[in-house]
Image (cartoon, rainbow, N blue to C red):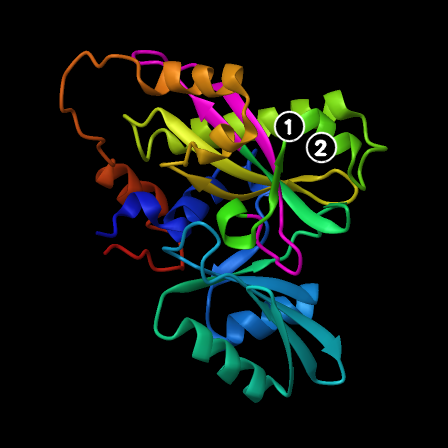
Amino acid sequence: MRTRTRNKWIKYLFMKKNASLAPYLPETRKMSNQALWSLLEKHRHVMVKPVWGSRGRGVIQVSDLGNDNYIIHFENMRTMKRGKKNAYRYIKSKIGSSAYMVQRRITRPTINKRLFDMRVIVQRKRNSSDWVVTGKVIKVAGKGYIVSNNTRSHGQLLRFKPGIQRSSIRHLPITELETQIDKVSLLSADTLRPLFPNHRIYGLDIATDRQGHVSIIEANLYPAMSHFLKLKDGVMYRRILSYKNEPPLLSNRKMIINKRYVSNHLADSSNPLIFH
């Protein structure tokens, strides 16, 4: 069953309202013919991604090569289409009637010529408002893939510092980069708290560009723990579980989404919310 907690569009709009967080969010619009070509003209490369998707399913990269030629990258396949009409028809054949978003592509760095980004786990304890970064892992996309999901792309998982040291951004100061990533991740969790007041864990998908500028790909409320099991970092995994499995004060308490807060704070947006 789809819930608002998995709606990427709602979370994007809500996070965008925070002026301190907005610079870390790549420009994103609801998918339409007009939105696609407008962002593509502006940025030359965009990501088309499902509002409800997870684990990299259904993500498409569209690139403008010039001269009315477009490369569409889906899974590990690249297809060239000539003309906007043909390109859009091909994209629609992949996404159907599902709700999608179009987003400026982040020019991610590479490890062994393969794109990578990061999963950052942010948690807080019960009755505490203090968020803590409890886990961090680099996700390297598999050969030919644009998504870094380990299962989907058959990619690689690495610890943060050794991964950066092997990457195309190894020239950047690692400590400063990690501090900035943690700052953005903690601010994201704190920003989302009024929307999901009882929630205590987020999995932030974070990317840097090749100059080290940090961007938020998306915020996940139910992050998988498989990354940290596969990484075989027992200390990090146990730390995440110690927060996650902290005994509740009240049993069977369900997470509450603050509907009134959503209505009051997103009502002025020109973009309709998707509540299913």
Residue that badge 1 annotates:
159
Quarter holding the C terminus is bottom left
- Which residue: 46% across, 63% down? 58
Magenta region:
120-148
Q: Where is residue 248 in the image (x, y as percent from the top left)?
A: 22, 14
Secondary structure of the residue carrying numbered label 1: loop
Whole-percent x, y for residue 223 in the image: 41, 36
Q: Are marks 2 and 1 in contact (CB under 8 Å)?
A: yes
Tell me which residue sits at (78%, 39%) in the image.
Answer: 167
Residue at which label 2 appears: 163
Give the amino acid type for the residue marked by disc 2 in the picture: Gly
In percent of width and height, residue 122 lies at 47, 25
- Of 189 and 210, nearer the camera is 210
Q: Which mark is residue 168?
A: none
Within the magenta stretch, is there residue 112? no
- Of residue 17 and residue 140, the one placed in the foreground of this image is 140
Query: Residue 166, how many percent across, how many down?
Result: 78, 35
- Crowd class of label 2 (few under 14; some 14 to 19; many from 20; radius 10 Å): many
Kindly indicate the quadrant of the structure image that contains residue 50. Answer: bottom left
